[in-house]
Image (cartoon, rainbow, N blue to C red):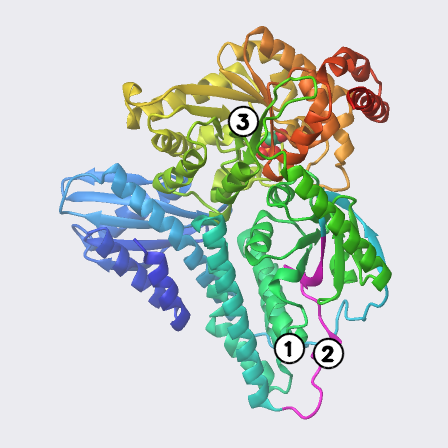
Amino acid sequence: MKIADKLLGVFGCSRSFDELLGFAVANIAHEMAADSCSIFLFDPSTRSLQLRASSGQPAGHATAALAAAEGLAGTALTQMLPETKDHDSGSVLAVPMALRGQPIGAIVVQTTQRGPYTAEQIQVLFEVASQMVGIVENARVFKTLAGGKDLEKKPGGPEGRGERHDGEQVLHGVAASPGIAIGRAVLRRAYAKQPAQQPSGPHDDAAERVRVRDAFEKTRNDVARIRDAAARDLGEEHALIFTSHLVMLGDPALHERIEEVVASGLAAPAAIDAALGEFADRLRTVGDPYLQDRVEDIDDLHSRLADHLVLDGRGGSLGTQIVVSPHVAPSLVMETKAQGAHGIVAELGGTTSHGVLLARSLGIPAVTGVDDIVRRIDPGDVVVVDGSAGIVVVRPTPETLARFEKRAQDVERLRTEFAKYRHVPARTADGVDVSILSNVAFGADLALAKENGAEGVGLYRTEFPFIVRGGFPTRDEQVRIYRKAYDAFPQGPINFRILDLAGDKFVSTRGAAAARGAFHGYRSIRVLFDYPHVLRDQVQAFALAAGRRPLRILVPMVSSVDELLRVKQMTLEAIEQVVEPGARGTLQFGAMIELAAAVEITADLAAHVDFFSIGTNDLIQYTLVIDREDPRMTSVNDAYHPAILRIIRRVISAAHHAHKPVTVCGEMAARADLALALVALGADALSVAAPEIPGLKRSLARASIGPLAEQIDRVLACPDGLALQAALREAVTARAEDTA
Ligand code: PEP
Ligand code: MG
């Protein structure tokens, strides 16, 4: 059912929110073969539901039926679950609408024609509701924006920044994703006001309006192109984030406001500055976090429009851009990939933040933690990103540029040399075979994993389709997504991780909202205990995707045997609802070891799982109490803290004692010296981002594990990270020399 697409069409040419809702209820009633459909929207000021649109004849007495519908809508929204009620005169079904932690409303359908709504029909309406949320929320944003007519705010003008920057600047940040990228800066989610935006020469209304139209047209084409590329390269679900941009570009109130400002005598860039700046300000003052989040979208559009108006193509072709942004959000990385930009520079984002992990897995060089970068750079500036050294050079001199171009060539040569190792087995110089798997987050990773010679998927992070939706993909959508993993690796192994919601992997439900920004407490499987239908749908989707093939399910953030058993039981029950035990392949469970509590009880957990996976990103975060999203806190050297390798030694030893294999799937497994240490400690497999695989195989091939294993206790006995790193380097180098 493509109600969302139909609504999008209507939205572009309609001024009225009520018209939009009227169209929606009529369509939903028709598609659901219902007698009536009603949409209730949540009013945050009164914290109550308001009937906003209804179609058809509700069953029985209209007022009573509507009251019943409202009651059911309220329950659905409170529970965040579909609610059904069957009575003599028919059935009523209510599904909630929520986004990024905010209750939005509910859709209610009623019928007298048949018995209770089936699970499939409930699922269909649930899907419609999640599609509707974005559309309804865009309408709400526009309504909020249209609400104030405070046009007195001084428009345009160079504020905050605007001073031209000259000369080379070398900036230091965090080496987030390796590689060298050279290109021209384009700002995303941030906007640079330019002195050039002031009108020069006599003002010509008509000409300025044409400039505005032209910039909108080009921006719309850009966004549509990125959306299509995202759908093609990354998967349909990743294209969703760009749909709301398109809706916003079509907002009649925005266009009207820009025209007004142009008519008041300002040039096109200043008019866009004024209108978008004013809209963003209004959203900032609304006490609704969802609406406040949309400021980012407005800033993003602002930067795109400015590229066309001010830079007039000087920003360079999409393929040569360096994206500069305050944050390195996963959506930004997807966009960067989809539009073919070369590198990323950001102010925030630690080495294991999820945006950074994505950049690494997609092979996009990135430097994060560069203070104030958005203010220090002008769009169109030439920028060098050295993601291996954590250096950004803005406006390099010809000599600097030549030096980095040479380095980029060297890196490329090395990459070609590493590529030879893609399809050779991972084996150390002294003949120890190591299983190398890939971490995967979305469709494109699977192709990369195969291309780089992964033996399977050591960690399938399943959060991204949820994140980009800001809601829940349906079970069928999930089946389609997970099946692709089996298409890529028919023989497996594929370790599907159960949805691991957290501060860094935020998804929109009211419950998960509580976990936003919080890495402790209410996260991961604990959230799923409150939302059992989410867990049910996901594990059923795993099982349906697997069919008769082996299914391996990884439970994240395990902290007790109790929790593990509860997840296992819920999973088994859910799977049995869709696949008979005799009709499926083997089912194995694994536990992720990421918490100190899990480390202590590895032996107890071993009795209930078939394998373990050590998530060192969170293990390091929780052991050293450092926020993995915060570049001020994290360093690639954290992994050398002796506590980390000693913990890993204990976990491997306890697991092996129970004959259970251990994979290490955090980022440290990709670093040559640490990877060798992990193998020396007995890790059975390493799971890393796909582009890291050839280099890792090469490092293994050049080292002997036996002698290192003999020295590993001495290395781990070092009292601090620096000493351990030096001892490890010495042990590894000595071995490499021995075998040379
Ligand atoms: C980890 O914590 O190390 C891990 C692999 O999981 P994620 O990075 O997805 O939290
Ligand atoms: Mg983790």
Q: Is residue 441 magenta?
A: no
Q: Amino acid at mark 1?
A: Pro
Q: Position of residue 492 (x, y in %)?
A: 46, 27
The answer to whether any part of residue 255 appears in the image is yes
Quadrant that contains the C terminus = top right
Which tag, 1 or 2, sits closer to the chain's start? 2
Q: Position of residue 464 (x, y in %)?
A: 51, 42
- The answer to whether marks 2 and 3 mark residues whose Cβ atoms lie closer than 8 Å is no
Q: Is residue 185 magenta?
A: yes
Q: Amino acid at mark 3?
A: Pro
What residue did someone put label 1 on? 269
Q: Residue at x 36, y 62 (%)?
A: 7
Q: Is residue 388 left or right of residue 566?
A: right
Query: Relative to residue 381, is residue 599 depicted above or below?
Result: above
Query: Relative to residue 428, is residue 442 depicted above or below?
Result: below
Which tag, 3 or 1, sits closer to the chain's start? 1
**First to last magenta residue range:** 181-203
Query: Real-space Cα distance between discs 2 and 3?
Result: 52 Å
Mark 2 crowd level (few <14, some 14–19, many ≥20, 10 Å Cα): some
- The answer to whether marks 1 and 2 mark residues whose Cβ atoms lie closer than 8 Å is yes
Mark 3 CB lies closer than 8 A to ligand 2 = yes
Q: Position of residue 54 (x, y in %)?
A: 28, 58
What residue did someone put label 3 on? 556
Residue 72 lies in quadrant: top left
The answer to whether any part of residue 152 appears in the image is no
- Give the numbered dot on residue 196: 2
Q: Position of residue 36 (x, y in %)?
A: 22, 54
Query: Real-space Cα distance between discs 1 and 2?
Result: 9 Å
Q: Is residue 565 left or right of residue 397?
A: left
